[in-house]
Image (cartoon, rainbow, N blue to C red):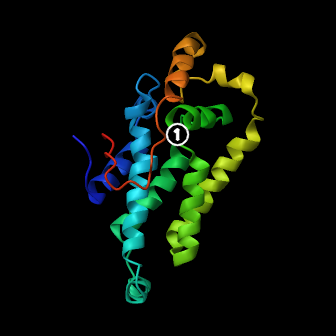
């Protein structure tokens, strides 16, 4: 069953943050990259949160109303929790894994964080700004931890797609198949939500 409400998205993300590693690995399953849960969370759900936040601020009156609102809105909480999830996603901790996510699953955490940071600054959403800064800091630590080179790609391990050295061929097939798939349009409001 697909997740169709912001409230359910929030509950799913909060639950997944405390999940075991084997559950997190399944979110980026190289055997079925097109339907991977990670695509839903970091592309569709995050985009949904941005669209709702933007729709509430598309008029001067809406902007003023949101500035006067003291409590966080559900869509803001979803975006914040996704930023926190990036930091707490304990099985992704190497540069090569980030590249596998981008290559196979079309998920770029750096882009996700940049979008959140930009929106938070534009609309003065302090909590989202703080969480995006923390996520960016986390990603930069990963980036500094290992210099990327193409040779590392085939050795990407189980944290990104359940891969080990013995599964290189499966990874290569998935990569080749992904070349023939259209890139996900995260701005498409009709895009299917991910399973959780």
Relative horizontal placement of residue 190, taking residue 49 as reference (left or right): left
- The percent coordinates of residue 15 (x first, y second) are 35, 46
Q: Position of residue 16 (x, y in %)?
A: 38, 43
Quadrant where the C terminus lies? Answer: top left
Residue 161 visible:
no
Disc 1 element? loop
The residue drawn where x is 31% and y is 52% is 190
Residue at (27% x, 53% y) in the render:
8
Tell how many labels.
1
Query: Considering the image in quadrants, where does the N terminus appear?
Result: top left
Asked where in the image residue 169 lies, by quadrant, the reply is top right
Q: For mark 1, what is the residue?
A: 106
Residue count near mark 1 (Cα–Cα under 10 Å), binned few <14, some 14–19, many ≥20: many
- Left/right placement of residue 140 relative to residue 23 reads right
Which residue is found at the position 55% from the left and 60% from the top? 115
- Looking at the image, residue 165 lies above or below residue 189: above
* Residue 142 location, quadrant: top right
Identify which residue, 71 or 96, lies in the foreground.
96
From this viewpoint, is residue 175 visible? yes
- Indicate left or right for 12 with 82 as reference: left
* Quarter location, residue 79: bottom left
Q: x, y (%) of residue 38?
A: 43, 40
Vertical placement of residue 33 versus 66, above or below: above
């Amino acid at each position: 069953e697909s997740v169709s409400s912001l409230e359910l998205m929030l509950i799913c993300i909060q639950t997944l943050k405390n999940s075991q590693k084997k559950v997190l690995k399944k979110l980026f399953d190289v055997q079925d990259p097109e339907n991977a849960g990670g695509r839903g969370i970091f592309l569709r759900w995050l985009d949904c949160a941005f669209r709702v936040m933007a729709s509430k601020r598309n008029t001067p009156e809406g902007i003023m109303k949101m500035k006067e609102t003291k409590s966080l809105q559900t869509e803001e909480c979803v975006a914040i929790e996704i930023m926190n999830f990036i930091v707490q996603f304990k099985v992704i901790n190497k540069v090569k894994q980030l590249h596998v996510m981008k290559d196979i699953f079309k998920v770029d955490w750096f882009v996700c964080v940049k979008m959140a940071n930009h929106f938070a600054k534009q609309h003065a959403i302090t909590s989202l700004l703080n969480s995006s800064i923390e996520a960016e800091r986390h990603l930069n630590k990963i980036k500094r931890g290992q210099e990327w080179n193409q040779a590392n790609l085939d050795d990407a391990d189980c944290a990104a797609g359940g891969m080990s050295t013995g599964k290189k061929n499966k990874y290569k097939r998935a990569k080749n198949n992904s070349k023939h798939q259209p890139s996900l349009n995260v701005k498409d409001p009709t895009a299917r939500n991910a399973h959780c």
